[in-house]
Amino acid sequence: MSDVNSIDRDGAAGRRRWLVLGVVGIAQLMVVLDVTVMNIALPSAQRALHFGTADRQWVVTAYTVAFGSLLLLGGRLADLFGRKVTFLAGLIGFAGVSAIGGASVNFPMLVTARACQGVFGAILIPSALSLLTTTFTEPRERGRAFGIYGAIAAAGSAAGLLLGGALTEYLSWRWTLYVNLIFAGAALAGGLILLERNSSPVKPKLDIPGVLAVSGGLFCLVYGFSNAATHNWHTPSTWGFLAAGVALLAVFARWQGRAAGPLLPPRVVLDRNRGGAYASMLIASSGMFGVFLFLTYYLQQTLGYSPVVTGMAFLPIAAGIAFSANMSTIVLMPRVGPKPLVAAGMVLAAAAMTWFAQLGVHTGYADGVLGPLILTGAGLGMVIAPSINTVTFGVEPRDAGVASASVTVGQQLGASIGTSLLNTIFASAVASYLTAHMRSGAGLNRQVLAGLALTHGYDTAFWWTAGIFAGGAIVSGLLFRPGPLYRTNDPVQVRAMEAA
């Protein structure tokens, strides 16, 4: 009888774990969607609230700046005050400011709401990932769980484009914000029922100097890169913030080695595999968000797709990411480890960007977009899911929140860097093309010339993105240790593995 009871308890615990994954997945999807769901809705919001073209990027940037700069703080709060508390608080806050943003009557109200979404997202996401880390500890189950989570994290951005297009076309741009109430409500109900309260084994303390230095540094970097997208690299508002960001992060790194209770303990980041995972996430995100940006404009401006059709056109990348993420973490990673998977994923993504760089004015979706889109998804799935799994593997429970936050910092910083850098390259290529052909007197009418210039800009940006992914393959190949991940406390074995 006792054996039967034990089996029943194990079965119930197993079902509970997968339900927790469902709750965490809903929360992750909500936050990831909000990075892109507003992109397609921006023209409608701009007409409704009467703000200028130069201002519209801040509807997206306000979210990413607040999110990226406060993630490490959010991760440490989860470690200190309990993951359930910060998870539920993040959900409630995110839903509340989403409702305010949806009801915006002017531009400042909308931007403020988006910034507050980023604040609560920075509290929510580290809690969600650390809950997953401490819930799934058995290697096979962990691989499946992180495959699903990685697929949501990567494919959610593409799904946001589809959802944003459908909501904008059939309801209103405001529903791109109101829809968060549905996601948050479902995750909140599940969290209240399924999550267990965990109390911190140490008295909660915050590394205030570390918080100020890293939050300020990340804010300056994200703001500086975002500013470069609308101005240029030579303005003080760009290079000044970038220089300040680098200086503050250098101060933060030095302080973490001396602080009694560091915000980001060196033991978390001074690991080759984690370093490789952080770098890979930053590089992959730089390229991924460039793909979303330029393909969105190509499909709508060059091919004339509606917002809904544009969103549907991105579904193959979501399918490719979902399949590749699960195959890599469940089947391949336990056998070969992250090194060959992440490097191969970067190579596939680079090949897809080279394919995209052949787009022309008359290229159709089936012959020029569908193939590289699927290939991009396959590559990104092999990078993102194994990287997330690697970052949180073997980390102590007390550091799970801040380790989880660190990988998301890389993702957000990569998105900001990639968007601003590639947008600047695109704009320069378009301007150069127009100048050269207007000066040469090619005899083309303005509309045809503009179309050719845009296509030239897209192709140039995709060539650069191919270079980013190729560089990522080299970086990941150098940083990751060969072989499967291992869990050991034997210092002799650790040194032997690191030497390998």
Image (cartoon, rainbow, N blue to C red):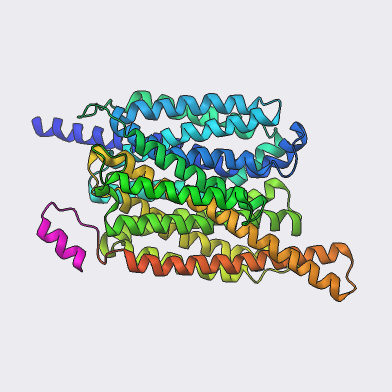
Residue shown at 60%/30% (left/top)?
A: 112
Q: Is residue 229 visible?
A: yes
Name which residue lies at 77% across and 34% down: 50
Instruction: Mark yes or no: residue 364 visible.
Output: no
Q: Position of residue 320 (x, y in %)?
A: 49, 58
User: The C terminus appears in which quarter of the rendering?
Assistant: bottom left
Q: Nearer the viewer, residue 231 or 184?
A: 231
* Residue drawn at point x = 33 percent, y = 28 percent: 84
Which quadrant of the view contains residue 478?
A: bottom left
Q: Depth check: give the residue in front, 8 or 327.
A: 327
**Per the image, is 382 magenta?**
no
Left or right of 244? Residue 405 is: left
Residue 359 versus residue 151 in the image, above or below: below
| Apparent side of residue 486 relative to residue 219 in the rendered image (left or right) | left
User: Where residue 195 sits in the image (x, y, percent)?
Assistant: 32, 28
Q: Quadrant of the N terminus?
A: top left
Q: Which residues are magenta?
A: 485-500
- Residue 41 at x, y percent in the picture: 68, 40
Reply above or below: 227 against 424: above
Closer-to-camera residue (464/452): 464
| Quarter of the view holding residue 205 | top left
Residue 489 falls inside the magenta stretch: yes
